[in-house]
Image (cartoon, rainbow, N blue to C red):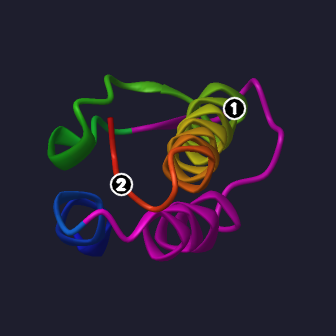
Amino acid sequence: MYFQMHLASQNYVEAALSLKLHADLHDWDVNVFVEPLEELGLPRQSRFHRKETLCLQILDCLGKLCSVIANGGTES
């Protein structure tokens, strides 16, 4: 998955956008379940919880970006 490649390269915006594209495939339905996504370590879960998990990972990527910017462009 592109997310892991971007994350390993510290391309946090691209990693977040990769997750956003995936999150956009899901709606907020708690009654429909999706299969595990082993690449991201995600279990079988409802579409709502999958989208929520991906959104939280997006925020984590953007938080890492903010940290890099605050440290003058170097990851701490």
The residue that mark 2 highlights is 74
Tag 2: amino acid: Thr
In magenta stretch: residue 12: yes
7 over 29 or under it: above or below: below
Position of residue 13 in the picture relative to residue 40 (left or right): right
Picture quadrant where residue 32 is located: top right
Q: Quadrant of the N terminus?
A: bottom left
Answer yes or no: do the residues labelled 2 and 1 have beta carbons within 8 Å? Answer: no
Q: Is residue 16 above or below residue 68?
A: below
Badge 2 marks a residue whose secondary structure is loop
Q: In terms of secondary structure, where does tag 1 sit?
A: helix
Q: Residue 7: where, in percent of width, then height?
A: 28, 59
Residue 69 pos. (x, y %): 59, 56
Could you give the CA–CA distance between mark 2 and mark 1, rounded to whole angstroms?
Answer: 29 Å
Q: Which residues are magenta?
A: 10-34
Of badges 2 and 1, the one in the foreground is 2
Dot 2, how many residues are within 10 Å of its Cα: few (below 14), some (14-19), or many (20+)? Answer: few
Look at the picture and state if 74 lies above or below 32.
Answer: below
- Residue 25 location (% of width, % of height): 64, 67
Between residue 4 and residue 32, name the one nearer to us.
4
Q: Left or right: 40 with respect to 15?
A: left
- The residue labelled by disc 1 is 52
36 or 5, which is in the foreground?
5
Say what amino acid the circle numbered 1 marks. Answer: Glu
Q: Residue at x 30, y 62 (%)?
A: 10
Within the magenta stretch, is there residue 5? no
- Which quadrant holds residue 36? top left
